[in-house]
Image (cartoon, rainbow, N blue to C red):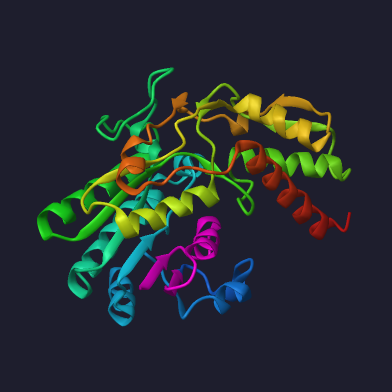
Amino acid sequence: MRLLITGVAGFVGHHLLDSWGPGAEFHGVDRAALEATPGGEALRARLASYRPLDITNAAAVEEAVRAIRPDGLVHLAAQASGAVSLLQPVETFRVNALGTLHLLDAVRGACPEAALLLVGSADAYGSGNPGSRIREDAPLRPQNPYGLSKATQDAWGELYARTYGLRVLRTRTFSHTGPGQRPQFALAAFAEQIARVDAGLQPAEIRVGSLDARREYGDVRDVVAAYRALVERGEAGEAYNVCTGEGHRLGDLLDRLLALAGVRAAIVSDPARQRVRDVTHLVGDPTKIRTRTGWEPRIPLERTLTDLYQDARERVRRESGR
């Protein structure tokens, strides 16, 4: 299989390449030159080709897809932060919604038989009811510009599947983390701060936003296994939750990170980390993807948290020499 991965240089892209195994020829695009991205040289060695690509440039997207003519595509390129989307709603919509439309139309013209996995977000659902698991037939009620952009992406994908017969598969991926995630996201930010406290680089305090939201926190390595399963066995035109079905209070996970690091620190509320209209409960029902593909999450949360912290501690050590 010739596989094109957009956003290949990001957090999930690295793990996707690690998980796929033999039998695939990987081609990657991302907005930056590989030399400017962490781990770029190692990434280049695993790719048959790479080119910088602005997903909002329709002509450039069409040219790349025509040149590669992939059998399958995994669309990871996105502005992936809800917090950033509140500051940059227009850019978030351009990248996530219009960028996806450009890719869909390029596939329609160049390789309409290819399987196209659109990696979406459970933020498109907005908040669920406490104690509930959200199914794919739940209404999409996004609560921030990021969620809205992903709901629009989802709608474009369904339209192109139904109208043009493209082999589009849509995910509504719930929160996930793991080694390599940037501290722009909550658990990775906690791990980074704890590692800096442990290294004596900052006072013994962890700055936080709201800790009461209950969300899933799957492992990125399980998530990319789900993406492969969907490309290979998913039903075209359908949407699938990629989720564990288990919710966790964010504050409890911070306590577990502190405990496994052996660090004591004060928890300090930081208004800059608070979100307007934050999602308070977001837990999914994984029945559909399990039934269709046989995929199950396999990595326990304790390992995810341990690997996340160890990765943050190693990065702090490299940067500081401590």
Residue at 62% over, 76% down: 41
Taking the image as shown, residue 219 lies to the left or right of residue 154, namely right
Front-lying residue, 315 or 202: 315
Residue 206: where, in percent of width, then height?
74, 32
Identify the image quadrant of residue 125: top left
Q: Quadrant of the C terminus?
A: bottom right
Residue at 38% over, 71% down: 3
Residue 116: where, in percent of width, then height?
29, 61
Identify the image quadrant of residue 317: bottom right
Q: Is residue 53 magenta?
A: no
Residue 138 vertical placement versus 20 (above, below): above
Q: Is residue 4 magenta?
A: yes
Task: Read off the magenta span.
Answer: 1-29
Identify the image quadrant of residue 210: top right
Residue 56 visible within the image:
no
Residue 67: where, in percent of width, then height?
32, 82
Front-lying residue, 78 or 240: 240
Residue 160 visible within the image:
yes
Q: Quadrant of the N terminus?
A: bottom left
Residue 95: where, in percent of width, then height?
38, 56
Residue at 38% over, 61% down: 74
Residue 80 vertical placement versus 47 (above, below): above
Residue at 45% over, 72% down: 28
